[in-house]
Amino acid sequence: MILSIRSFALAVSLATSTQAYKTCVVPFGGPGVDDTLGLTAMLPNCSTDASIVFQEHTTYNISTPVVFSNLSHVEINILGNLDLPKSIPYVQAAVNASGGRLYWFSISGDNVTLSGNQDPEWGFIDPYGVPWWQAAPDTQPLGGLANRPHGFMINANNSIIRRLKVRKPVAWGISVAGNNNHIYDNVIDASYDLNNPAVFPFNTDGYDIRGNNYVIENGTVSNGDDCVAVNSGNNITVRNMVCEGGHGASLSSANGVSNVLFNNITSKNSLYATRFKSSLNSVGNITNVTWSNIYVLNATFPIFATGVYFDQNTNRGRVPGDYPANSTATHISNFLWTNITGTISDIYTGDGSCTTNPCWYNVANATNTAAVTLQLLRGTATNIRVENVNLMPIDGKGTPNVLCDPSSFVDGTSNLGFKCENGPYVPQ
Ligand SMILES: *[C@@H]1O[C@H](CO)[C@@H](O)[C@H](O)[C@H]1NC(C)=O
Ligand SMILES: *[C@@H]1O[C@H](CO)[C@@H](O)[C@H](O)[C@H]1NC(C)=O
Ligand SMILES: *[C@@H]1O[C@H](CO)[C@@H](O)[C@H](O)[C@H]1NC(C)=O
Ligand SMILES: *[C@@H]1O[C@H](CO)[C@@H](O)[C@H](O)[C@H]1NC(C)=O
Ligand SMILES: *[C@@H]1O[C@H](CO)[C@@H](O)[C@H](O)[C@H]1NC(C)=O
Ligand SMILES: *[C@@H]1O[C@H](CO)[C@@H](O)[C@H](O)[C@H]1NC(C)=O
Ligand SMILES: *[C@@H]1O[C@H](CO)[C@@H](O)[C@H](O)[C@H]1NC(C)=O
Ligand SMILES: *[C@@H]1O[C@H](CO)[C@@H](O)[C@H](O)[C@H]1NC(C)=O
Ligand SMILES: *[C@@H]1O[C@H](CO)[C@@H](O)[C@H](O)[C@H]1NC(C)=O
Ligand SMILES: *[C@@H]1O[C@H](CO)[C@@H](O)[C@H](O)[C@H]1NC(C)=O
Ligand SMILES: *[C@@H]1O[C@H](CO)[C@@H](O)[C@H](O)[C@H]1NC(C)=O
Ligand SMILES: *[C@@H]1O[C@H](CO)[C@@H](O)[C@H](O)[C@H]1NC(C)=O
């Protein structure tokens, strides 16, 4: 306690040392002390023109969710490690008390820089997700424990998120809303053992993006869900990313998203390398989306679009692909896949996210060498093109196949770039 008061005093004296820009060092309370309390007490004086520093060589105990509100011109520097609580029942109770959705870190404001540390030993955010994933098989067929907490919700404009290292998140990693944000050099590590699919990191989306004018680059995501999911907005570039084990460079939305570029993405051992998904019976338009220079290593579905996605939990008992003829879907236009090379996973297809039979990702009539899969309802697509594709089954056997229905395309199939049928990939 004495330690805590002393470092608190240090923080305040640093905070008042310069008028214009304060440095607020987050006090470390010592063993067994929840450092969220000291941080929260300090915040009112550190929310404008300030640098909030979690010191290096310090492992902070962040037992309570942290809310940084209305920051303006603030840098949060995570130089030390942030240890989140290990007790699953304790965390579940916190999530339950918050109505079922809780982010451990909520940050809002303008001109915020959230920075981590590139020192190999410091700057880690540790939510201790592995025991949650290990417990998941006991909840089958639900897919993951109930009341999972998420990582970061950052609702900010003109902001930067860089060099964060999230180690073993429980569920979503970094969700960002707001405009004009730059996200780079982050590592989200929800890596899991491909040979033990029963222990699977459900819903560990790397990024969920909602807003205009983003660059997301130079990051690594190892996980069991979308690497980057663009959920809404305009003018979004995702580039130079390595995505491993998950559900790909993903556009997941029903309406209003436009001008999205996914470029130079390396995809390893993923269910999807690139994916568009929109829920069955959506209404809306998505336009101007490109996936280029995608290096695929061992993906079940390297090139994938569905307008008839349905969630395995909310659609229990229904078979994927089995929907009434009057179903609706989002209209997609000006989609381009170009320079897509690599290998299709045809030995062990799918991943541990499947908890039902058939699997939620099952596509009727798709083969296990599905290079291109366009699961689009009649008349729901315009100006779609797939070109410069070089994808081969990883075992070298069989042909890369496509799943394609000519009735999907309002403007016909002459500019599609390949022969539209359920059969081998034939460029044209
Ligand atoms: C973190 O703080 C909480 C609340 O004081 C305490 O119960 C817990 O044991 C602390 N954790 C560690 C690893 O010290
Ligand atoms: C905030 O700063 C003022 C002025 O420097 C100081 O008097 C006050 O104690 C500080 N409050 C906190 C919670 O640090
Ligand atoms: C943040 O504010 C600083 C100082 O006012 C300014 O120099 C910088 O350009 C701003 N950053 C952004 C991304 O707006
Ligand atoms: C698109 O986003 C980038 C990155 O934020 C920005 O520099 C550019 O001005 C935006 N373009 C338009 C047309 O808004
Ligand atoms: C991202 O990586 C590219 C290629 O290595 C580099 O040119 C660019 O400067 C990097 N971006 C940032 C913000 O560091
Ligand atoms: C492509 O991304 C990788 C990281 O996966 C990076 O090393 C490389 O420099 C990028 N290429 C270009 C041309 O930016
Ligand atoms: C390909 O991916 C599958 C499923 O994730 C995995 O079981 C298999 O080990 C991977 N193969 C290689 C060669 O990495
Ligand atoms: C989608 O685009 C069509 C044709 O441009 C338009 O008629 C329709 O209103 C749009 N739908 C939505 C939900 O914006
Ligand atoms: C889509 O791209 C075209 C061509 O670049 C552009 O004219 C159009 O405005 C874009 N659509 C949207 C909704 O931004
Ligand atoms: C499709 O038709 C069925 C039976 O008439 C009706 O119950 C359902 O609401 C319709 N669905 C849509 C999306 O229009
Ligand atoms: C596709 O790859 C070729 C050859 O590497 C390159 O010249 C071209 O610029 C790439 N296309 C795009 C859209 O990046
Ligand atoms: C699957 O293929 C069969 C035989 O060609 C066809 O009758 C059926 O409509 C196809 N189903 C889907 C969902 O494409």
Image (cartoon, rainbow, N blue to C red):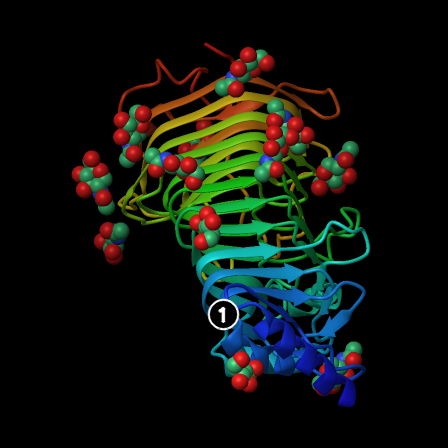
| Quadrant in the picture for residue 55 | bottom right
Left or right of 269 on screen, residue 427: left
In this orientation, which residue lies closer to the viewer: 313 or 175? 175
At horizontal 56% and vertical 51% (from top left) the residue drawn is: 161
At horizontal 67% and vertical 81% (from top left) the residue drawn is: 8
Left or right of 214 on screen, residue 409: left
Q: Residue placed farthest to the bottom in the image?
A: 1
**Residue at which label 1 appears:** 47
Left or right of 347 on screen, residue 214: left
Q: Is residue 26 above or below residue 364?
A: below
| Quadrant in the picture for residue 126 | bottom right
Q: Is residue 309 above or below residue 128?
A: above
In this orientation, which residue lies closer to the viewer: 259 or 183? 183
Q: Quadrant of the N terminus?
A: bottom right
> Where does the image place residue 62, in percent across and percent down from the top left?
67, 75
In this orientation, which residue lies closer to the viewer: 373 or 193? 193
Q: Residue placed farthest to the front in the image?
A: 18
Q: Residues within 10 Å of mark 1 (few under 14, many from 20)?
A: many
> Where does the image place residue 264, in percent across and percent down from the top left?
58, 28
Amino acid of disc 1: Ser
Q: Is residue 188 above or below residue 344?
A: below
Ligand 1's quadrant: bottom right
Left or right of 129 on screen, residue 290: left
| Residue 189 seen in the figure | yes
At horizontal 31% and vertical 46% (from top left) the residue drawn is: 255
Q: Is ligand 2 less than 8 Å from the beta carbon at label 1? A: no
> Where does the image place residue 213, in percent across and percent down from the top left?
40, 42
In this orientation, which residue lies closer to the viewer: 162 or 336? 162
